[in-house]
Image: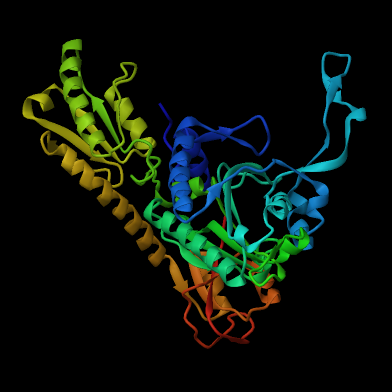
Amino acid sequence: MAKNLTKRSEDYSKWYNELVLQADLAENSGVRGCMVIKPYGFSIWEKMQAELDRMFKETGHQNAYFPLFIPKSYFSKEASHVDGFAKECAVVTHYRLKDDGEGGVVVDPDAKLEEELIVRPTSETIIWDTYRKWIQSYRDLPLLINQWANVVRWEMRTRLFLRTTEFLWQEGHTAHATKKEAIEETEQMLDIYADFAERYMAIPVVKGLKTESERFAGALETYCIEALMQDGKALQAGTSHFLGQNFAKAFDVKFTAKDGKQDFVWASSWGVSTRLMGALIMTHSDDNGLVLPPNLAPDQVVIVPIYRSDEQFDLVSKVAKEVMSELRAKGVRVKFDNRDTHKPGWKFNEYELKGVPVRLAIGPRDVENGTLELARRDTLTKETVSRDEVSGIVVALMDEIQKNLYKKAQNHRTENTSEVSTYDEFKEVLKTKGGFIYAHWDGTNETEEKVKNETKATIRCIPLDAKDEDGECMVTGKPSKRKVLFAKAY
């Protein structure tokens, strides 16, 4: 059985790491900075993947796959892109090992590659080199491609799910005939990410634009969704980039328009990663373990039998299987835990730790009385329910728990959102409360850097729904047209 978790109020970072390990989500691997995603953690990621994949396909996107290795020369073609990723790239220089004569192996010096290969940190370059062959005419557009893949970014400080050297993600790459279409695509994908975060993950998000210094390398605009974690830090939960014609020009991707003229295509790219797992954990979980929204829980309900003899087990199991069949027929994901290797109390603790939304327990007395015990993970409350009504109650609870988790996260964000007008006030709120802070900013990189260096807070985004309101920058007093969102972040 798992040990007691460190309390969030004592050490949030330690609590997070312990929860990831004890809830069987992931663990560190033999490769520094890389993780092993365990079956339970991967099953949650698969639920995310399935829903997002459906949303992508409903908007006309198709999946493809591109190579893990990218020739180094490709990165030289788009200057800001190579600058943005140069320090994070893993480089393959040789293609063979050989026996060292002492029972080990060494890199064969005769097997040096003519051109080094970069292990994909993102795929714009290899994909745009491919699109040059796929796009000739306006009839080939729009080209709407997504890939599910892994990427490598050489991180110095790592934390499971939040920042790892290798991580899983999806990356969409689209090509369009007009600037307007490419911007509409970029905004559409941001809306999909926000919808997924709110409806499936039960996480409220702020949609916005990144500042120039925080844009994706090679993008003209980067849109993002920002979420607030329980410890008052922000987490960037998804990004969508308008790339203009930068990559099309770098890789000479032109198309012949209806009027016979040639032009470079317009582009977007967008992605979310296994970092969403970190967001899910840090938004809803508590000192008892993981709390999962029903829409993403691998098991929405677990049934635990209580018995003292084989005869009682048979009696209880019959009812449990009937309930399981009824719930499955209504689309509920149910697990009947009939293992005889652990006592019911152990199982109760395990499923609480793993965040299963609803637990049903049934013993011989329940069979007699026509009842079951129902426990909710989100409220940690228990009640006795009628056997005849249990399936209807559970189905309704799935929606109720989903909404309750969203409302709880939304209330937390509201309580931890501040507006300030002076830099001193900003620093005080950051020190005593944290959370999201709205303040006027003069729009300069210098002021942005000053705040970052002095407080470790960054401009998370320029909210898309920000009202135009004349004001003064909290740092310089210079004119400002709207407030931006600041926070410390992961």
Residue 166: quadrant of the picture: top right
On the question of residue 171 being in view, the answer is yes
Quarter holding the N terminus is: top left
| Residue 258 appears left or right of 126 | left
- Residue 220: where, in percent of width, then height? 66, 69
Q: Position of residue 256 (x, y in %)?
A: 69, 65
Q: Is residue 214 above or below residue 299?
A: below
Scheme of image coloration: rainbow
Q: Residue at x 91, y 29 (%)?
A: 109
User: What is the number of callouts on the image?
Assistant: 0
Residue 433 shows in the view: no
Please tell me which residue lies in front, 377 or 255: 255
Rendered-image quadrant of the C terminus:
bottom right
- In terms of image quadrants, where is residue 461? bottom right
Q: Nearer the viewer, residue 262 or 88?
A: 262
Task: Please give the name of the residue rendered at 45% of the width and 72% of the height, measured from the top-left corner.
Answer: 418
Residue farthest to the top? 310
Residue 417: horizontal and vertical position, in percent? Answer: 44, 68
Q: Is residue 39 left or right of residue 75?
A: left
Q: Position of residue 489 (x, y in %)?
A: 56, 59
141 lies left or right of 228: right
